[in-house]
Amino acid sequence: MIRFERVSFRYPGASHPALDGVDLGITEGELALVIGPTGSGKTTLLRTVNGLVPRFSGGILTGRVVVAGYDTSRVAVRELADIVGLVAQDPTTGFVTDTVEEELAYTMEQLGLAPQVMRKRVEETLDLMGLSRLRSRRLAELSGGEAQRVAIGAVLTAHPRVMLLDEPTSALDPAAAEEVLAALTRLVHDLGTTVLMAEHRLERVVQYADRIVHLDSYGRATTGDPSSMMEQSLVAPPVVHLGRLAGWKPLPLSVRDARRRSAEVAGRLAAFVPPTRTEPEPCLEVRDLSVGYGPVEALQPTTFRLGAGEVVAVMGRNGVGKSSLLWAIQGSGTRTGGSVRVSGRDPADMHPAAARRLVGLVPHTPSDLLFMETVAEECDRSDQTSEAAPGTTLRLVERILEAVDLGSHPADLSEGEKLGLVLAIQLSAGPSLLLLDEPTRGLDYAAKERLASIIGRVAAQGAGVMIATHDVEFVAEAADRVIVLADGEIVADGPTGEVVVSSPIFAPQVAKIFAPGAWLTVNQVAVALEPA
Amino acid sequence: MRRRRARRLHAAAWWLWALGLVAAATQTRNPLLLGLIVAVTSLVVASRRTQIRWAGGYRMYLVVGLVVIAIRVGFRLLLGGDFGRTPLVDLPRVSLPAGVELGGTVTVEELLAGLYDGLRLATIVVVIGAANSLADPRRLLPSLPRSLAGVATSAVVALSLAPQLVESLARVRRARRLRGESGRGLRSVRSLLVPVLEDALHRSIALAASMDSRGYGRSGAGRAQHSVIVGLAAWLGLGAVCVGLFGLLSGGDVAVSGGTMTAGAALAALGLSQLGRNVARTRYRPDAWGGREWLVTLAGGAAAVGLAAAGVMQPTTLNPSLQPLEWPGAGPVALLSLLLAALPAISAPQVAARAPRPIVEKAA
């Protein structure tokens, strides 16, 4: 169905190719998963399939990409619309119309389908993607997860033979991600749709894949069936790491496979008691805080405390008010009632520069904070506004990011690097409370691990950390405590182990495997299993 | 009996109504009539949008209108030359090379002339703003000839850009507070503009790529290419329409200009329909055109025709005299036709307003 013949691609002005001699074929009805570290050309590979690369990106493509018999270098992108459907990484940038229903029909209109066919398919897709409640909503009002489902639905209605999905679940909460993936596997099974999907969160998708395409940092591809690929891959979900640790053969890819083999290890773990923590001094006190936008109540009056040195994850469905909570605490977000005290003071009453030394927030689009020409200038600017000693931010950047070219333009950095830079800028002010909004989007496993260790270090120095996230594996790794929001209220608040283990949605893979034992990460298991 | 689904008005009806009011506004410099046009559009917008939040978009156009008037009056006073006999203030006079004189005596006539001109421009801006807040201009695009896909793509991108700019401006301003940047000086402009423009550029390209990958303007694989002659005819026709229109508006010979325009329109229609034959496209739930659409369109037309008629009958109504100074008056024909233009405030169905949107919450 899709054939890459010695495909190489280099972006204009890039020092090394994004794709280097990619040679692979994907047969009809296959679900192929593209994996690889951040910046390894996964998005580029996907976009060559319908010709957006190089037509919309510039650069030089050599070799041939053939889709359903069409050579993409000879056919315009728009002529492939009935064969290839693309769901881009940020779905909101691709919306053309105004409402959900019109957006679902858009591609079909361009294909010239009969009105009755369109009506029928729109209804089917509304049901399939769970969108019927939203049918006449404006696209601009959708939450991230809803927008993602509309974007996938809008591609589905045209019944393309090939679907390209660029991180389809990165913006979704665990439950919504399951739904979307279930719908996709149904398409693959029932309609024989070929799916090419790039995804960082392997724990969500790897068990559905028929084939894995691994891209390394130099744009070279290797391919194979999932279990054999997972045996060596550096990027791997926790279940695979656990399987390697315990020496299970063949390697389990799903929680179910792993659970069936876990009895022996679970028995050894039962003898081990994980260490407990002590109650720390409070650094944040939130009393009856509520947030509303016009008639919409985003957050009911909420009361909680956060200890110094504590790392709290705020979880919950898409659009439940996690971001609103963070912004309200920081002080520039809307508050409709209640009080916030960070180390005894309210950041909303303070000058922005002073408030920064109290609360640092890294928003979910870190690039909003970057406006200088080079990374080095950003660091200097940050030292000035933070009134920190020259070089403070630079040292933080070097600690957070392994290697970054100080002369490069901030806009050219990868998502992970931008996040790291903004984190360094915010930390340079030495805040006693750090708020992170969805920090793991677009990060690979290595980058997430580094982020977790930095958060751990910040907490160890006595700052409180609050993270709004959907990433259960990251929560298991980084957070001491979890707050679950639902319908604008706190429905669960407790140590990570207690909260996530009892929840089928928020439990990380390791917890699912060893339930009811409170094991969260592969590292914990590894430490426990180590011969004393 | 089945309850009928609430139908929204065809977008083109709102824009034709606005076009009628614009045509009316361009004919007059009478502040009374222009003020009435602004009042009529405000009434219609206020009564046809279901939620109070309508004001956001429309109010912005009102502000832009005020700025237009201020600029027009300012330039008129500065570069006015010697016009009018009723002195108001004496400004220092500066002579520039090439015969340009700045400053000098400001007269009441000069002030009023600037005010009238500015008001006319401002009225046009406000009327367009009203149409914009009543019907998303993107809903007009499907009515565009199918062969103009490239132009329409640019239009969609441009139209989507404006609200996005407002949104990302708000987001970045908030983010700037996070960095502790104070809101003054050249640097603050930069810290605001760079992320906003970067975002806008990135989004525009992404939108164009999305439209292309979803088949906008496709001809269906394997069809014949358009003939060059047909394409040339279409563009020649459009050019002729522009020339003819310019002739009509600038007071050229009516027969020659009208003829050029009609011939051009025919040529363009022929060419475009030939080009469009290769584009197979259908509409999902097209907006229907019915009695209410006619009513709204005619209400706008009434304003244009009414003012034209008033101009023929009493030319001084439309352009009140400045030399000698006279109070502007308004005849019954002009007043009545503008009141007719307010009809959609009752006749048209309600327009669902864009609900208030929290900027941050969307990301959650």
Image (cartoon, coloured by chain):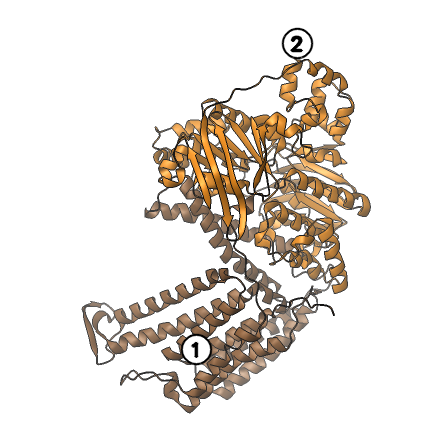
Chain colours: A orange, B brown
Marked residue chain, label 2? A
Q: Going 40% across and 35% down the picture, which residue do you hit? A: A356
For the C terminus of chain A, give its image quadrant: top right
Whether residue A363 can be seen here: no
Which chain is disc 1 placed on? B
Who's the residue at 57% across and 40% down the image? Answer: A489
In which image quadrant can residue A178 be found?
top right
Residue nearest the observer in this picture, A74 or A416:
A416
Q: Position of residue A95 (x, y in %)?
A: 60, 54
The tag on residue B26 is 1
Residue A523 % position (x, y): 62, 20
Name the quadrant of the N terminus of chain A: top right
Q: Secondary structure at mark 2?
A: loop
Q: Nearer the viewer, residue B223 or A505?
A: A505
B51 shown above or below A480:
below
Which x, y percent locates residue B341?
Answer: 50, 78
Measured Cα–Cα span from mark 2 to mark 1: 89 Å
Q: In the figure, is residue A426 to the left or right of A140? A: left
